[in-house]
Image: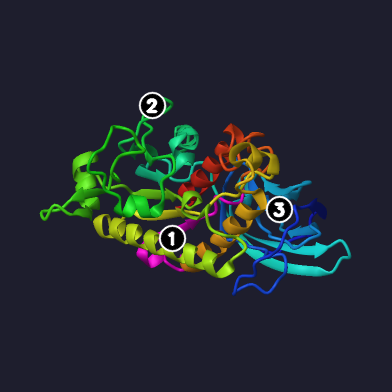
Amino acid sequence: MLGRWITVTTLCLLCGQTITADDQTDTVRLTLPPTMYAVVGQPMGFYFDNIVLTQPPGDLQFDVACDIGESEATRWVVTPTVDDVGLHEVTVSVSGLDGVQQARKSLTLQVVPADARAGESITLLIVGDSLTHATVYPNELARLLSTDGNPDWSMLGTHRPDSATNGVAHEGYGGWTWQRFASHYEPDPDGTYRKRSSPFVYLNDGAQPHLDIPRYFDEECDGQRPDYVFFLLGINDCFGANPDDPVAMDDRIDAVLSHADTLLAAFHKAAPNAELAICLTPPPNTRESAFEANYKGAYHRWGWKRIQHHLVEKMLAHFADREDENQFLVPTELFIDPENGYPDNNAVHPNTDGYHQLAASLYAWLKSR
């Protein structure tokens, strides 16, 4: 439902050149998922820097129209009440400081009750890279699910770091990619995550590496199949792409999405009733100094921002309308504060606040199911 226009805010973005995607006509590349999810009593929203890519100069005005929520200096946010349960249209209009509109798009906000799914039992598996390996957002997701009004839950997985809270497990490893999970076999593992096979890859009868999700479930999960599998990947897959070569960048992303399709198809075949949640790759730290601290000039914030934004655009198109295959998009790129949700000295790994915002998006999507 389209409601009143809310506060107009101005955001100054970093400048840089734009690589234009084939399906975009606006210059700021306003990119929104079709749906975002929220739970009564839990903050949710989006940061303006996470939804646009601009040509210099980067001074923009964001007008947000919705019958609930409010705009702040750098974001639109809502903490829904019981009266807000249902569907709401959120329309974002982006203009230059001259007032000329450059882009306008809408998404649907789905608000669910605080006690949605209470009394049910669900089994989760989380697959990811170093953001998952850190185990902060899996711990927070477990905490949220353990509050009143939620389903009973359990997590599958062979990785239980020392930081994992009670019951938390996953398959998250620093530096891993869609391709590595789909195909990597290590004949001489050393007991570390850096030198090990994918948990999903085994030798077949012909002594050849083989993606075997049923065997993983049977041997590592006591035969259980998950109800939900989250996949949070993409940073390592695409970080080394060349943002100044749009053709090569497209080819790189297309290859990554092909590896994703391979892994997703194998999971769907092994657990046809499981819902496969594809998390949209989170944005970078807004600080160039964080990239300098990590990469000493080899990689820059604007380069990864261009790659990440285009990756999200292509994921939205590639995975659209796949609900019949039990594949769903989770808008994990929206509600991470690109400044206060990251430490001063890390380019792509959030701080505790940022990880908790990430968990809030997963939680809201789960409750909406």
Label located before the other in sequence (1 or 3): 3
| 148, 365: nearer the viewer | 365
Look at the picture and state if 161 lies above or below 289. Answer: above
Q: Could you tell which of marks 3 and 2 lies nearer the N-terminus?
A: 3
Frontmost of labels 1 and 2 is: 1
Q: What amino acid does circle 1 point to?
A: Val
**Amino acid, disc 2:** Asn
Q: Is residue 332 magenta?
A: yes
The stretch of residues the image draws in magenta is 319-335
Read off the residue under disc 2.
166
10 Å crowding of disc 1: few (<14), some (14-19), many (20+): many
Q: Residue 149 — which label? A: none
Q: Is mark 2 on a helix, strand or loop?
A: loop
Mark 2 is surrounded, within 10 Å at the Cα level, by few (under 14), some (14 to 19) or many (20 or more) other residues, namely few
Counting from the top left corner in percent of width and height, residue 199 is at: 28, 44
Mark-to-mark CA distance, 3 and 2: 36 Å
Q: Is residue 66 magenta?
A: no
Q: Label 3 belongs to which residue? A: 48
Picture quarter with the N terminus: bottom right
Q: Calculate the distance from the C-alpha at mark 1 to the C-alpha at mark 2.
A: 34 Å
Dot 1 falls on a residue whose secondary structure is: helix
The mark found on residue 256 in the picture is 1
Horizontally, is 201 left or right of 76 in the view?
Answer: left
Q: Residue 207 appears at what percent x and percent y?
A: 13, 52
Residue at 69% in and 39% down: 289
- Is residue 97 or residue 13 the one in the foreground? 13
Residue type marked 3 = Phe
